[in-house]
Image (cartoon, rainbow, N blue to C red):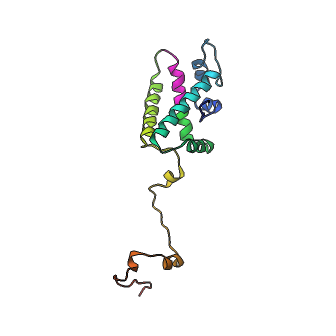
């Protein structure tokens, strides 16, 4: 069974210079384009790396990742895109440019944080986590709810302003 890809070859090509992608994915020295078997295999490997990290943390399931992909989550796609480019660079023996080395360090740090559960992808519950919210209880609900102040040993509750 093929690994679920969280980014398409077209989306990957939009992120980076297509000439670089074509050169890195070519074994003959000619530009191989952006949608060849090597690029697709690297996308699958990168998607697998991301999936392994987030499943290890236990914060997400495969269904959650598919939902994020369906919702067009840019964080998910950026991480997979960067991991894919790193996979392409790993195919080559030689010096990696300093900008790519910085990207590698940053991406692997993000992946490690996802694996530890200290970084999250966009999630509706997580987006509102930590934000103050006020919930007003209607008088109908208040009359049927039991609160600590309803205990008979406490002074009577004031329901009207004096």
Count of marks placed on residues: 0
The answer to whether 149 is drawn above or below residue 11 in the figure is below
The answer to whether one can see residue 16 in this image is no
Which residue does the image show at 52% across and 18% down from the upper left? 91
The answer to whether one can see residue 102 in this image is yes
Spot occupied by residue 36 in the image (x, y as percentages of width and height): 65, 22
Which residue does the image show at 47% across and 30% down from the upper left? 103
The answer to whether 41 is drawn above or below residue 73 in the figure is above
Which residue does the image show at 60% across and 14% down from the upper left? 27
Q: Nearer the viewer, residue 85 or 138?
A: 138
Which residue does the image show at 64% across and 24% down from the upper left? 34
Magenta-colored span: 82-93
Q: Nearer the viewer, residue 18 or 10?
A: 10
Indicate the quadrant where residue 57 lies: top left
Indicate the quadrant where residue 12 lies: top right
Position of 81 with respect to 98 (left or right) is right
Quarter the N terminus occupies: top right
Spot occupied by residue 140 in the image (x, y as percentages of width and height): 54, 78
Farthest-out residue, front: 1
Quarter the C terminus occupies: bottom left
Farthest-out residue, bottom: 162
Residue 87: within the magenta?
yes
The answer to whether 57 is drawn above or below residue 35 in the figure is below
């Amino acid at each position: 069974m093929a690994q679920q890809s969280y980014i398409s070859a077209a989306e990957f090509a939009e992120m980076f210079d297509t000439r670089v992608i074509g050169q890195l994915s070519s074994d003959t020295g000619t530009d191989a384009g952006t949608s060849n078997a090597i690029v697709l295999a690297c996308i699958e490997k990168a998607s697998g790396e991301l999936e392994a990290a987030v499943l290890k943390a236990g914060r997400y399931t495969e269904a959650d990742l598919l939902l994020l992909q369906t919702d067009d989550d840019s964080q998910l796609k950026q991480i997979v895109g960067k991991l894919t480019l790193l996979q392409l660079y790993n195919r080559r023996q030689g010096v990696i440019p300093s900008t790519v080395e910085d990207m590698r360090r940053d991406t692997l740090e993000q992946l490690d944080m996802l694996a530890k559960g200290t970084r999250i992808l966009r999630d509706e519950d997580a987006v509102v986590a930590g934000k103050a919210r006020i919930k007003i209880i209607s008088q109908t609900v208040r009359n049927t709810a039991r609160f600590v102040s309803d205990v008979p040993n406490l002074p009577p509750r004031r329901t009207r302003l004096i």
